[in-house]
Image (cartoon, helix red, strand yellow):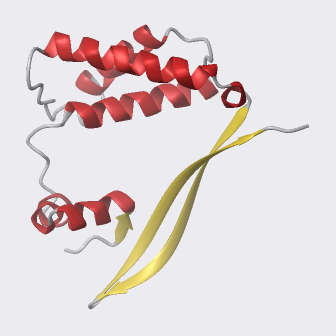
């Protein structure tokens, strides 16, 4: 059955590989593994959200390792293994170093602390061949607060 809701990532999957689109979105087959880079992106975005909603002064290394542990062991996708190409611990440390650099760089910009972060979703209908689909486009905006 063709998916009735298409997100940007769904369309990206189709453009990248129609067979991947079929397996993931029509046949609903889970992937055999997760890429560490994709998990890393999920973790960094979670940390950015925590900076704004919980604790601007969190320890980025510890917060990264805690969130990575959650993604590996407790998230909805924890049943899908992460494919570590080399030594797992060494790769995790390298990713943590990169994440610390990203978070510290983000915190160093004056406007980021006082920004409001909004998630905007726009929905619209698209007809593709004989299928009608609801499209959802997402975008995150940060606007500095002004007085």
- Left or right: where does residue 136 sit relative to residue 16? right
Residue depicted at 65% across the width and 25% down the height: 109
Residue depicted at 39% across the width and 17% down the height: 64
Q: Quadrant of the N terminus?
A: bottom left
Residue 15 pos. (x, y %)? 23, 67
Residue depicted at 14% across the width and 68% down the height: 18
- Left or right: where does residue 146 sit relative to residue 126? right
Residue 14 pos. (x, y %)? 22, 66
Residue 68 pos. (x, y %)? 32, 21
Name the residue nearer the viewer: 63 or 113. Answer: 113
Name the residue nearer the viewer: 115 or 34. Answer: 115
The picture quadrant where one finds residue 36 is top left
Q: How many marks?
A: 0
Residue 21 pos. (x, y %)? 18, 64
Q: Is residue 103 visible?
A: yes
For this orientation, the residue located farthest to the bottom is 130
Name the residue nearer the viewer: 83 or 123. Answer: 83
Residue depicted at 12% across the width and 38% down the height: 33
The picture quadrant where one finds residue 40 is top left
Q: Quadrant of the C terminus?
A: top right
Q: Vertical placement of 114 versus 6: above or below? A: above
Name the residue nearer the viewer: 47 or 104. Answer: 104
- Left or right: where does residue 140 sit relative to residue 99? right
Q: Is residue 76 visible?
A: no
């Amino acid at each position: 059955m063709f998916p009735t809701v298409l997100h940007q990532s769904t369309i990206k999957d189709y453009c990248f590989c129609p067979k991947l689109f079929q397996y993931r979105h029509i046949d609903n087959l889970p992937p055999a593994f997760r890429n560490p880079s994709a998990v890393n992106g999920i973790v960094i975005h979670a940390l950015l959200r925590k900076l704004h909603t919980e604790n601007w002064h969190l320890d980025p290394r510890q917060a990264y390792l805690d969130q990575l542990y959650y993604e590996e062991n407790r998230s909805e996708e924890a049943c899908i293994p992460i494919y570590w190409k080399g030594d797992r611990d060494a790769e995790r440390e390298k990713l943590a170093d990169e994440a610390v650099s990203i978070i510290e760089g983000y915190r160093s910009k004056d406007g980021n602390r006082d920004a409001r972060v909004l998630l905007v979703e726009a929905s619209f209908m698209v007809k593709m061949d004989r299928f009608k689909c609801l499209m959802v486009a997402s975008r995150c905006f940060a606007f500095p607060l002004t007085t």
